[in-house]
Amino acid sequence: MSGITLSGAAAGNYTLASRRDDDGKYHGRALTATVTAANKVYDRTTAATATCTLTGVVGTDVVTCAGTATFDTALVGTARPSR
């Protein structure tokens, strides 16, 4: 999956990777994004439908993630990686 973005009312309070700017201050709580591509019927394309799940969201904060995913090949197979 690429181009993962965060959205939601509390998205500004989070980052996908822990970081510090030059000022030495911590900017946002780090989240872990787990991406899973769904099985699909063979259609000669690498298009994938993926689900993005976040770990580390605090309490009732509303944060979601989104991006795009493709399979590594259009060939039929099992356990194909997505990117």
Image (spheres, rainbow, N blue to C red):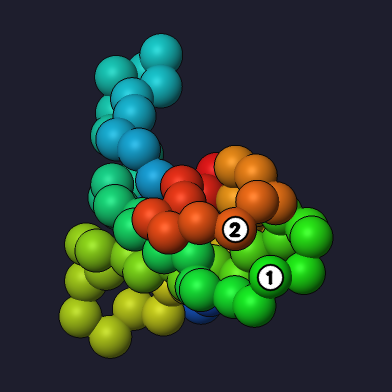
The extreme bottom residue here reads 60
Q: Which mark is drawn over residue 6?
A: none
Residue under label 1: 42
Tell me the residue at 41%/14% (across/down). Answer: 22
Q: Which mark is drawn over residue 76?
A: 2
Element carrying mark 2: loop
Locate residue 31 relative to residue 12 in the image: left or right. left
The answer, for residue 22, to whether it is visible in the render is yes
Percent position of residue 31, x then y: 30, 53
Tell me the residue at 43%/59% (across/down). Answer: 78
Percent position of residue 73, x then y: 65, 44
The residue type indicated by label 1 comes to: Tyr
The answer to whether mark 1 and mark 2 are in CB contact below 8 A is: yes
Q: Of residues 29 and 17, which is closer to you in this image?
A: 17
Element carrying mark 1: loop
The answer, for residue 4, to whether it is visible in the render is no
